Image (tube, helix red, strand yellow):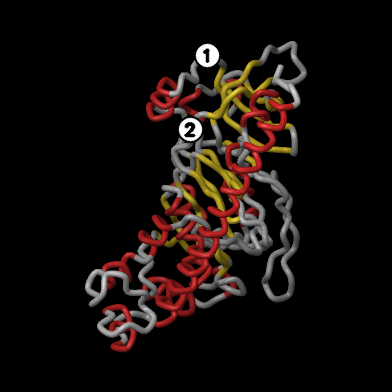
Amino acid sequence: MSSASLQLNQLGWDEWFDTKAKETGLTEHRLARVAAVDREQLLVRDESGEFRVKLAGRFLYVTDQPIDFPCVGDWVCIQYNSSDMFGIIHDVIPRKSFLRRKAAGDNIEFQMIASNIDVALIVQSCHFDFNVNRLERYLVMVRNGHVHPVILLTKTDLVSPEALQQLIEEIRSAGINAEVLALSNITGEGVDNVREILLSGKTYCLLGSSGVGKSTLINQLIGRHIQETKVVSDTGEGRHTTVRRELIILNNGAMLIDNPGMREFGILEAEEGMGNSFADIYELASKCKYSDCSHTNEPGCAVLSAVEEGSLQRAHYQNFIKLRSESEFHDLSYLEKRKKDKAFGRFIKSAKKDMGITRK
């Protein structure tokens, strides 16, 4: 599909964004969607095609949180003429949904992955990469951002049908009810099932570890080589090639965002995602003797009773405790950091005022 012939609704614009743009007064400038981010430059797409843009000085001045800067999938208000080398981004339209994580390392900060996603395709290999605990972590992140999850199990050519069925049973026994699709990029089996769920005007994002076949799958869906891939190792493990997030428009009008493999991602401010992903545990928690039960050692804990009886999988329970503790720790650290950042910001503004420095 030629980007020059696209209308905004074919790029994902709908009544929700239209309402938000009017409510926030962001209707003055031209609208475009972010397709890629390369350091200080962004690639955006609108009805006329693709072009490069930069952030307005005012936007840089008033924006203090990394998550407020444009990311792939965002709708932005721009000023651009065909004679200009770069367009200028003035504002970001509020996000309907988002994928974000705690930044890697010790930094307690959000890192945006993508925004305005309809469906997250969580990819795990049937061979070396399969891990239910990691899958639950992805689901917490996805559901916390109001994104619908679908699980893709790749490399089915490396396992028997019986082994594949066992993996699916492991997913179900952990209380995960998301749709599961199995496929092989080598034989092509199951790829058409993925194509069928990709709808025109909707946005999808591929999530998963390095080497699970995300880029190869994109090439399969597009029908031509667009994403670089590397030969898998003798163990069946792929080699990571994706280096940036990019919004790709498929022939049927669906939009797909590839994502570099994530070696680690922490949970931050994920209470809603925890509630959705561990609904079975939260339902049991309502029956605990104490309303503030931590589900670790209290008498009359319905959650611990279910674990002991075998009706609640122990690994599922242990992962819940781990993710909840991690989220609570990071949330507290993040709040403390934000308080310090605000205090420092007030100090800088006060110092500038005392020195007679005013913004031009």
Q: Secondary structure at mark 2?
A: loop
* Residue 332, horizontal then vertical, whole percent: 52, 59
Residue type pointed to by label 1: Glu
Q: Which sits in the foreground, 112 or 83?
A: 112
- At 46% across and 49% down in the image, what residue appears? 145
Above/below status of 3 relative to 223: above
Whether residue 152 sits left or right of residue 214 in the image: it is left
Disc 1 is placed on an element classified as loop
Q: Residue at x 72, y 28 (%)?
A: 352
Amino acid type at circle 2 is Pro
For mark 1, what is the residue? 28
In the picture as drawn, the residue positioned furthest to the bottom comes out as: 308
**Disc 2 designates what residue?**
94
For disc 2, the neighbor class at 10 Å (few under 14, some 14 to 19, many from 20) is: some
Taking depth in this image into account, of 95 and 333 the one nearest to the observer is: 333
Asked if residue 196 can be seen in this view, the reply is no
Is the N terminus in the top left, top right, bottom left or bottom right quadrant? top right
Q: Position of residue 270 (x, y in %)?
A: 46, 57
Front residue of 335/284: it is 335
Query: Residue 316, how many percent across, how many down?
Result: 42, 76
**Quadrant of the image containing the C terminus:** top right
**Residue 130: assigned label:** none
Q: Quadrant of residue 123?
A: bottom right
